[in-house]
Image: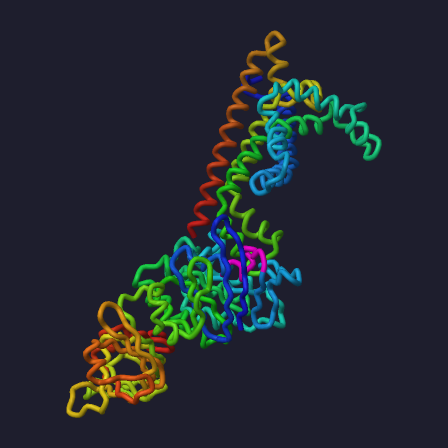
């Protein structure tokens, strides 16, 4: 067997990683845009607290976050028990949990990018849209949102890349179960713990680098296409 | 019809403006920068909330603090043309134009897409992005976008301020044409008397947040007490006229005004075009009998209305020649002629003085086709 061919375990880890990260971004994107809008546009008491909570994952050790998730979303956790009882959904120790852990860890990066972009939107354009007969919701979807697309792309790619690399919170929250929660970093970690895993580890390492680069290139291309569209 | 009575405190600045305008045409909001013009127009649009007062446009109550009426901007049906255009950069010119078109109630739509595009001469721009337009083109598209919402009033906030002289000349005729083409009131904010003379029918003079004078352009421009606000160093009268006939060999154009005919040097305008002229007080002489054998072309009978001391040692005489006219003479001349209010006199105006003053053109001219 060629030393470059991927083993089923590695393919599984790669696929799972993409799947988990994809879901993490998909679920956190609408929430992230909403949070960014609230932080960029509204003034309310306790805003700094909300801001702080959203940014917490950036400053907390991932293991701490993973443990908190376990406490909240475990079968006996406050939210976990409720979800299991009402919808029959189990989060802990499943790929859904891995996606949740990734989403929470990547959330501040997403919010920051979108918020920055939102703050750059000319509010005058929104006023103009209002005078043209559009209500606030229509203005948001036809003017504000299209104008923050660059920020959304940047935030989504950043969040996706961050999710691909998620390790600490994931292993604490959903453990390291092959085919269910063993994403790329976890597989890599496992390989480094067994004798003779060096080659496999190196292959995964290369894959991780390629994925990261691909994400950055994709982000750049999308941003350029958007700029070209604005130029007409 | 516009009926505005608004009060609002913004920090130390208080806006307290009351004005009504019956005119279907253009009402200019005139004042120096910082006089509160934009704030008032924003209140009409619903972008700024007055502390108290009312705003009524064509019998529609847009805001009334006593009745707790405060329509959101999207319900006011105002067409707002901003100083900076504010075209949506992510949409094509066509999408910009049609943005508000479908949002107006069907029964109240009276503006047709093709008509507006043709009127503003923007057919060839329709598939471009705003980033690819010149300043003048942007403003024309912005005007079209506002018009296509079939508004009940057009609000223009210094739509020409960001344009250079050539672009101004490009956009101005289109604005001049709007009030005739669509019979809706236009509220036009400007600090440029030139634009106002070209466009407006009525004028509201604002000074530090208050409307200090409301009336027709002709009346307000000849009022000496407003001179410090209008900023003319020489006072003068503004007369609205219509081109009556062209006399090529005589080198004259005859302009019809309420008091007769004003002869001015050949003016490049169609017969029937509306022209506003400004005649400075110092280029008007007064005679007790109609002078004969004189090069002056305009000898107009009138009545002395009022005599007031002017700047320095001179005297300002206000005449009624079918419309107000100002003459500035020396105290010696006043004594010699023994002028009194109510006296019948002749105003003597050199044709050249009219054209050497400023000549403003309005209405349809050859610039359009």
The answer to whether residue B351 is visible is no
Determine whether, in the image, residue B83 is placed left or right of residue B281.
right
Q: Position of residue B331 (x, y in %)?
A: 21, 76
Who's the residue at 20% across and 80% down the image? B333
Name the quadrant containing residue B120: bottom left
Residue furthest to the top: A195
Q: Eyeballing the image, is B123 above or below B132?
A: below
Q: Position of residue A194 (x, y in %)?
A: 63, 9
Who's the residue at 53% across and 28% down the image? A211
> What span is colored magenta in the figure?
B41-52
Name the quadrant containing residue B334: bottom left
Who's the residue at 36% across and 82% down the image? B323
Return the residue nearer the eye: A179 or B136: B136
Who's the residue at 30% across and 62% down the image? B165
Q: Is residue B333 magenta?
A: no
* Quadrant position of the N terminus of chain A in the picture: top right
Q: Position of residue B366 (x, y in %)?
A: 33, 77
Q: Eyeballing the image, is B152 above or below A216?
A: below
Q: Position of residue B330 (x, y in %)?
A: 20, 76
Determine whether, in the image, residue A179 is placed left or right of residue A223.
right
Residue furthest to the right: A85
The answer to whether residue B29 is visible is yes
Q: Eyeballing the image, is B64 above or below B314?
A: above
Return the residue nearer the eye: B26 or B291: B291
What is the image's colouring?
rainbow
């Amino acid at each position: 067997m060629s030393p470059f061919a991927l083993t089923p375990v590695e393919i599984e880890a790669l696929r799972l990683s993409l799947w988990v990260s994809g879901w993490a971004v998909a679920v956190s994107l609408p929430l992230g845009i909403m949070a960014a809008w609230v932080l960029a546009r509204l003034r309310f008491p306790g805003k700094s607290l909300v801001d702080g909570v959203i940014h917490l994952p950036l400053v907390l050790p991932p293991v701490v976050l993973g443990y908190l998730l376990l406490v909240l979303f475990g079968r006996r956790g406050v939210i976990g028990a409720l979800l299991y009882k009402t919808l029959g959904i189990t989060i802990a120790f499943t790929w859904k949990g891995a996606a949740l852990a990734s989403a929470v860890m990547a959330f501040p990066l997403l919010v920051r990018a979108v918020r920055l972009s939102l703050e750059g939107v000319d509010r005058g354009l929104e006023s103009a849209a209002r005078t043209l007969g559009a209500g606030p919701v229509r203005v948001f979807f036809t003017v504000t949102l299209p104008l923050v697309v660059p920020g959304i792309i940047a935030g989504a790619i950043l969040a996706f890349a961050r999710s691909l690399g998620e390790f600490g919170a994931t292993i604490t929250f959903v453990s390291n179960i092959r085919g269910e929660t063993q994403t790329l970093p976890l597989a890599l970690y496992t390989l480094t713990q067994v004798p003779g895993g060096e080659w496999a580890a190196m292959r995964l390492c290369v894959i991780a680098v390629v994925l990261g680069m691909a994400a950055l290139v994709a982000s750049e291309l999308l941003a350029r296409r958007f700029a070209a569209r604005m130029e007409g | 019809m516009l009926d505005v009575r608004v009060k609002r405190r913004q920090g130390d600045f208080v806006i307290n403006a009351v004005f009504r305008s019956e005119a279907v045409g253009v009402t200019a909001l005139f004042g120096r920068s910082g006089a509160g013009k934009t704030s008032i127009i924003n209140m009409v649009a619903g972008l700024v909330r007055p502390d108290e007062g009312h705003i009524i446009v064509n019998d529609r109550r847009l805001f009334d603090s006593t009745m707790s009426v405060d329509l959101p901007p999207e319900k006011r049906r105002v067409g707002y043309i901003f100083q900076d255009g504010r075209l949506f950069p992510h949409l094509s010119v066509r999408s910009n134009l049609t943005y508000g078109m479908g949002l107006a109630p069907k029964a109240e739509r009276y503006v047709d897409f093709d008509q507006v595009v043709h009127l503003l001469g923007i057919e060839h721009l329709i598939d471009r992005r705003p980033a690819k337009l010149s300043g003048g083109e942007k403003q024309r598209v912005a005007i079209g976008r506002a018009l296509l919402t079939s508004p009940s009033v057009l609000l223009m906030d210094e739509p020409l301020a960001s344009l250079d002289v050539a672009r101004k000349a490009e956009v101005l005729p289109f604005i001049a044409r709007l009030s005739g083409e669509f019979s809706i009131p236009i509220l036009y904010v400007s600090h440029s008397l030139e634009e106002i003379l070209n466009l407006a029918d009525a004028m509201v003079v604002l000074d530090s947040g208050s409307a200090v004078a409301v009336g027709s352009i002709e009346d307000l421009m000849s009022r000496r007490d407003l001179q410090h606000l209008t900023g003319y160093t020489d006072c003068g009268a503004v007369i609205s006229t219509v081109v009556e006939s062209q006399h090529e060999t005589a080198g004259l154009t005859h302009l019809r005004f309420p008091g007769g005919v004003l002869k001015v040097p050949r003016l490049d305008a169609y017969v029937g075009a509306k022209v506003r002229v400004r005649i400075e007080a110092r280029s008007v002489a007064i005679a007790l009998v109609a002078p004969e054998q004189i090069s002056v072309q305009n000898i107009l009978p009138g009545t002395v209305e009022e005599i007031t001391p002017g700047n320095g040692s001179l005297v300002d005489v206000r005449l009624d020649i079918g419309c107000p006219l100002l003459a500035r003479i020396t105290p010696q001349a006043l004594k010699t002629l023994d002028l009194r209010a109510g006296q019948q006199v002749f105003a003597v105006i050199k044709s050249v003085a009219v054209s050497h003053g400023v000549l403003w053109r309005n209405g349809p001219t050859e610039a359009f086709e």
